């Protein structure tokens, strides 16, 4: 760790506006020096979590607020090292490199022993850049001891602790090189072989002084995968010529502890590599979000893309010349496999291959014999729709890191309910690989083995169709691009798509690296249209912005970069409704080999999944009715479900409870308590009577619920109600958050009383501009829950100016932001007030309308 004097120097030298765009929130115990650095650089601290926070600073995942920031607000959480290293870089480093989870060495604490200065710098740089932590002291926090020798005090001490794994430096380099943690046993230092001494070589000229940034560190911190062979050779050579030594400092620097020069090297290296790579600093790549998974007896869990409007960081240009960002054709490994398997090169312009039995709507039934046929189940097998995955054995990869094991377990249940199986390891019995991208070793092996490679989107759609059929959309196949994406400098909008189609288009735009905006401006590069009509289409034609169909996006998603060539091919300019989403499978013949043979269901699978007859319930002798409540599959319903079903038709006197600010595990336990007591758990805040939370939380649930609920209570209300087997009086358990009330200038009980007596925005009409954060739909929900009205079309400035109450206050409110100022120039010119989103957000928490505090000041010149 840095000493106080080092921090003092950094604080004094940090530019005053270095962190000017940073709004941070602290989780857990963070050093005061970190906060001083942020404040000295012009950062602003938020005392409660909200969508306005740009950086959550945390050094542990154990705190409840960490889960809240990640799960509820989806905010970027960074380690405190991001602050110090950014200052040393003289540039804000990318947030995703300092996440607490999901990186290669996340959760790993390294202690180094008997490494010379250059090797220690290289190891430290690689570990820190890939999410780990380095320290000099060998204590219970250490997970790995890095040492090339077996003769040191630290080595002997580490042998006595099973939790500490002992490895040589090659383990770090190989893990980075292969982008996965290697088996530590293979890299134990007692396996290192040293060559015998050789005769001394003839004298060589004195080497030139090394630059400030060691080559080892430069390679280890490259954005491209892993260090090169030359670096590994240099370090190993240095280790072999080293003799056994003590754990003493060398040249005034402790081994294994990053010196200030090493940190400066890391800062300069990361900064220069970011600039050289052309990446947008401080903007993580969007990840593919799987679709809503279809459940047989319940509502789908939605996981829609979160794409907010963002400005394009380059001059307006009405051509697509630079849309590719110089990305090379993807996956050379796939090309090699194709060559080994004797597969023909990808051909373009072929019609879409057909399917063997009743395809989806829009798929051709009859196709020429020269076009390959792709099959699902064997046509001779009459598979019941509710067992559409019968005979399918899945292996899931990639998604565990994206969604977590709990979500995968839910998928497993759904697959098994439809006749399929999920194996925990890859083997010859696996028929389907469920993977998000083409980057894993499992994908390469499965492709060679001609397995069926699909994504969660395919699984979801097959369950909806109730037929196991080959992929027919681009998102059904694992993504080609993951790190470097071909359209990362483009801004795209869409028109005439609704519902699930709209979500799919957003996912496709994210998968190629482009930014999605819900509105149309001159900065947009492309408009994706379902049909040639509408205001966006008219504006795109007027501004000479290319208008393309979904086929253009589909081809880019599967790696067909020829779609970016100018002039745009005519097939991308035609809008054939109902068929745009169909993927031309001639683009991806290497991914469709596994579908060339039909899947034959074994007799064992038929026997295992033959539906069992429903058991006949015993009649109740007293009233002739059944004693037990039975589900659709004949099983007895659990008590919690019975209580929920019994209360759904009551007179509304039962509590309708909503939770906010709790981790999933806590919410699950509280849900069981509510259902046990006969209450209802709701997810729509407009329907709740009781909001359960621990603090005043700036969540959408809180902002809406405060306008409609009767009580805001802590979880103690439920815990003590469970002990009494009834819902207790709420007044005793009303939320008392003195810190939050002081910061917000409100009294929560008084706010709830005001909201129940008179809706806050009653009589007010709002217009919300498209670029505000939170999004328009969220602010609309809050306004409407508080009795206000939201209109989509803004009237003229003259009409707005005339709408005032008897006190002279406006009754027509414009909610906007700095990004959308150009939409309000006529209002500013006539001195008509416009307001930022806090007019609504803070207003509902205080239950007060403030026409001065949240007014947005816009210069008239």
Image: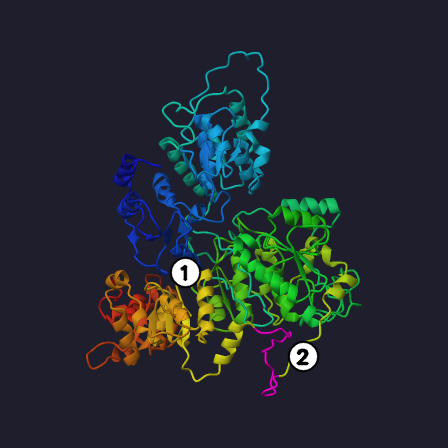
Q: How many marks?
A: 2
Q: Secondary structure at mark 2?
A: loop
Q: Which residues are magenta?
A: 620-637
* Residue 304 drawn above or below residue 782: above
Residue 633 shown in magenta: yes
Which residue lies most toward the front here? 622
Q: Which mark is residue 841?
A: none
Query: Which quarter of the image is occupied by the C terminus?
Result: bottom left
Residue 350 locus on image (x, y percent): 71, 60
* Residue 377 drawn above or below residue 175: below
* Residue 133 drawn above or below residue 406: above
Query: Which quarter of the image is occupied by the N terminus?
Result: top left
In front of the other: 31 or 153: 153
- Horizontal placement of 354 versus 79: left or right? right
Name the chief secondary structure element in magenta. Answer: loop
Residue that mark 2 sits on = 616
Q: Is residue 779 visible?
A: no
Residue 525 shown in magenta: no
- Residue 724 falls in image quadrant: bottom left
Task: Rate crowding at label 1 as few (under 14), some (14 to 19) or many (20 or more) other CA atoms within 10 Å.
Answer: some
Which residue lies most toward the bottom here? 623
- Horizontal placement of 175 versus 31: left or right? right
Residue 448 locus on image (x, y percent): 71, 48
In front of the other: 475 or 155: 155
Residue at image point 72% right, 54% down = 429
Q: Is residue 406 visible?
A: yes
- Residue 360 falls in image quadrant: bottom right
Residue 565 locus on image (x, y percent): 58, 54
Residue that mark 1 sits on = 73
Q: Earlier in the sequence, mark 2 or mark 1?
A: 1
Q: Do tag 2 and tag 1 residues touch (Cβ < 8 Å)?
A: no
């Amino acid at each position: 760790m840095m000493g106080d004097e080092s921090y003092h120097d950094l604080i004094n030298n940090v530019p005053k506006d270095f962190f000017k765009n940073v709004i941070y929130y602290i989780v857990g115990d963070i050093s005061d020096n970190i906060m001083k650095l942020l404040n000295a650089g012009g950062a602003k601290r938020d005392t409660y979590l909200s969508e306005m926070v740009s950086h959550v600073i945390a050094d542990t995942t154990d705190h409840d607020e960490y889960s809240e920031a990640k799960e509820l607000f989806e905010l970027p959480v960074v380690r405190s090292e991001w602050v110090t290293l950014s200052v040393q870089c003289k540039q804000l480093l990318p947030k995703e490199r300092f996440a607490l989870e999901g990186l290669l060495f996340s959760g790993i604490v390294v202690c180094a022993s008997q490494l010379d200065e250059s090797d220690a710098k290289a190891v430290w740089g690689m570990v820190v850049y890939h999410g780990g932590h380095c320290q000099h002291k060998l204590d219970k926090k250490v997970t790995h001891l890095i040492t090339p020798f077996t003769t040191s005090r630290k080595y002997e001490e580490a042998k006595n602790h099973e939790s500490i794994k002992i490895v040589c430096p090659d383990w770090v380099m190989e893990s980075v090189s292969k982008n996965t943690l290697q088996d530590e046993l293979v890299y134990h230092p007692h396996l290192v072989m040293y060559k015998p001494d050789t005769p001394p070589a003839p004298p060589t000229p004195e080497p030139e002084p090394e630059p400030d940034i060691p080559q080892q560190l430069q390679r280890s911190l490259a954005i491209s995968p892993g260090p090169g062979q030359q670096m590994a050779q240099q370090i190993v050579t240095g280790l072999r010529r080293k003799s056994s030594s003590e754990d003493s400092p060398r040249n005034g620097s402790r081994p294994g502890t990053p010196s200030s020069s090493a940190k400066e090297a890391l800062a300069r290296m990361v900064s220069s590599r970011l600039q050289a790579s052309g990446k947008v600093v401080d903007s993580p790549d969007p990840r593919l979000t799987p679709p809503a998974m279809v459940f047989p007896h319940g509502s789908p869990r939605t996981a829609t893309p979160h794409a907010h409007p963002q400005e394009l960081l380059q001059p307006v240009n009405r051509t697509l010349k630079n849309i590719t960002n110089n990305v090379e054709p993807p996956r050379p490994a796939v090309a090699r496999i194709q060559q080994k398997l004797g597969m023909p090169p990808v051909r373009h312009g072929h019609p879409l291959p057909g399917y063997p039995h009743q395809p989806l709507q829009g798929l051709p039934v009859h196709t020429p014999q020269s076009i390959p046929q792709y099959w699902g189940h064997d046509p001779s097998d009459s598979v019941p729709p509710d067992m559409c995955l019968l005979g399918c054995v899945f292996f899931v990869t990639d998604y565990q890191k994206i969604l977590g094991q709990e979500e995968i377990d839910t998928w497993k249940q759904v697959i098994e309910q439809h006749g399929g199986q999920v194996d925990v390891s890859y083997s010859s019995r696996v028929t389907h690989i469920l993977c998000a991208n083409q980057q894993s070793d499992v994908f390469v092996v499965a492709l060679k083995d001609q397995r069926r490679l699909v994504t969660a989107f395919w699984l979801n759609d097959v369950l909806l169709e109730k037929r196991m059929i080959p992929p027919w959309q681009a998102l059904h196949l694992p993504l080609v691009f993951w790190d470097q994406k071909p359209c990362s400098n483009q801004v795209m909008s869409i028109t005439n798509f609704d519902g699930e189609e709209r979500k799919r288009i957003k996912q496709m735009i994210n998968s190629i690296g482009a930014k999605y905006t819900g509105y149309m401006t001159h900065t947009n590069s492309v408009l994706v249209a379902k049909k040639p009509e509408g205001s966006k289409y008219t504006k795109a034609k007027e501004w000479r912005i290319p208008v393309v169909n979904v086929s253009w996006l589909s081809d880019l998603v599967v790696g067909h970069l020829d779609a970016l060539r100018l002039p745009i091919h005519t097939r991308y300019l035609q809008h054939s409704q109902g068929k745009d989403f169909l993927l031309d499978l001639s683009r991806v013949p290497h991914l469709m080999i596994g579908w060339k043979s039909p899947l034959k269901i074994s007799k064992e699978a038929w026997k295992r999944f033959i539906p069992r007859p429903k058991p006949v319930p015993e009649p109740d002798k007293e009233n002739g009715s059944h004693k037990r409540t039975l589900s659709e599959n004949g099983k007895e319903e659990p008590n919690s479900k019975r209580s929920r079903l019994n209360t759904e038709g009551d007179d509304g006197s039962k509590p309708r409870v909503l939770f906010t600010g709790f981790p999933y595990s806590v919410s699950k336990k509280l849900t069981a308590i509510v259902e046990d007591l006969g209450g209802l758990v709701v997810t729509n805040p407009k329907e709740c009577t009781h909001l359960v939370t621990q603090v005043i939380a700036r969540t959408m649930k809180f902002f809406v619920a405060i306008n409609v609920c009767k009580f805001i209570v802590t979880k103690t209300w439920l815990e003590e109600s469970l002990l009494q087997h009834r819902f207790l009086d709420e007044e005793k358990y009303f939320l008392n958050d003195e810190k939050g009330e002081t910061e917000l200038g409100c009294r929560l009980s008084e706010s709830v009383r005001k909201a129940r007596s008179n809706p806050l925005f009653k009589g007010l009409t709002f217009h919300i501009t498209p670029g505000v954060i939170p999004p328009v739909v969220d602010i609309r929900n809050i306004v409407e829950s508080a009795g206000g009205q939201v209109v989509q079309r803004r009237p003229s400035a003259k009409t707005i100016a005339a709408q005032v109450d008897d006190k002279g206050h406006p009754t027509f409110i414009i909610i906007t932001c700095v990004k959308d100022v150009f939409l309000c120039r006529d209002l500013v010119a006539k001195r008509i007030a416009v307001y930022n989103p806090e007019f609504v957000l803070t207003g509902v928490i205080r239950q007060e309308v403030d026409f001065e505090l949240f007014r947005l000041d816009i210069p008239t010149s």
